[in-house]
Amino acid sequence: FELGEMFIGLSVITYVIPRSHEALVLNALKQIGHIRYPDQTFRKSLEPCMPKVLRAFETATDWVVCIQKRPDEVLLADLIKHLGGQIEPKHTAWIISSLLNLACFLDVAGVTLNSMSVSTVFASPTKHAVSLYGGWWYAAEAGKLLTHLPPDTLPLASAALRTYKVATGELDLQSIKAIGRACLGDPSGGSLRGRKDLPSPFSQFLQLPAAKSAFVEYERWPKVLEDSFGPRRYHELKITGEDVYPQGAQNG
């Protein structure tokens, strides 16, 4: 990835990053260490979706950061690739649902990730859940100045963010919509309108600018789901971590 190398194992993600990016590594460790939960109920449901640093250490040339993951979780970009370049709309929908839920938590916690993309988000097809394990190098407290943005989310930054560089949750919400478009095989969204397999309300949601508040988007989302797919139902995606990462295979 843009800062170094990422190795995805069965239960660990290992990042190897040159020490020239040490400030970003230290920022990630600080931001992860400062994650707080309003109560034990929030902790129980959300802590598994946040990064847990198993080990972080320096070598002569690099920083090595090891993040815990579950065997059923795969990098979203790899899941899209495994499925031939796109994920069905009904499965993309639960990915968006999970991301909006986590965006609301980040809002409550006063944190902006600034790096949500298919290259930083991990997904569990069996649990219909996503985890924000990657990209914490760019995280910042809401209202604080940003120093860096990654290539995946920089094009999504508003004119105000580019000018004043003050972290808000709006970029994360724009990124969630971009993730939805990427899951559907069209990151730009140019070909989504009129697709026969894509309900119009869902297409419009992914193409419209994001609200400034995660809670506003989260409140809008159930109507988008119902108008798009009808009453809520569970759609099984029969894919495991072993399917995407066969034992013994080399994965980038």
Image (cartoon, rainbow, N blue to C red):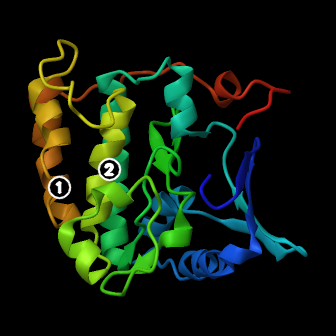
Give me the disc on residue 197. none
**Residue 163 visible in this rendered orientation of the protein:** yes
- Which residue shows up at 33% across the image and 36% down it? 187
Quadrant housing the C terminus:
top right
> In the image, is residue 81 above or below residue 120?
above
**Residue kind at label 2, given as amino acid type:** Ile
**Residue kind at label 1, given as amino acid type:** Ala
Residue 200 quadrant:
top left
In this rendered view, identify the residue nearer to me: 50 or 115. Answer: 115
> In the image, is residue 135 above or below residue 77?
below
Provide the residue designation for mark 1: 210
Position of 227 compared to 244: left or right? left
- Position of residue 211 measured from the top left corner of the image (x, y, whole percent): 14, 60
| Residue that protrudes farthest toward the right in the picture | 60
- Which residue shows up at 19% across the image and 63% down it? 215
Position of 22 compared to 161: left or right? right
Provide the residue designation for mark 2: 176
Circles 2 and 1: CB atoms closer than 8 Å: yes
Mark sitting earlier along the chain (2/1): 2
- Which residue shows up at 64% across the image and 61% down it? 3
- Position of residue 8 measured from the top left corner of the image (x, y, whole percent): 72, 44
Position of 148 compared to 97: left or right? right
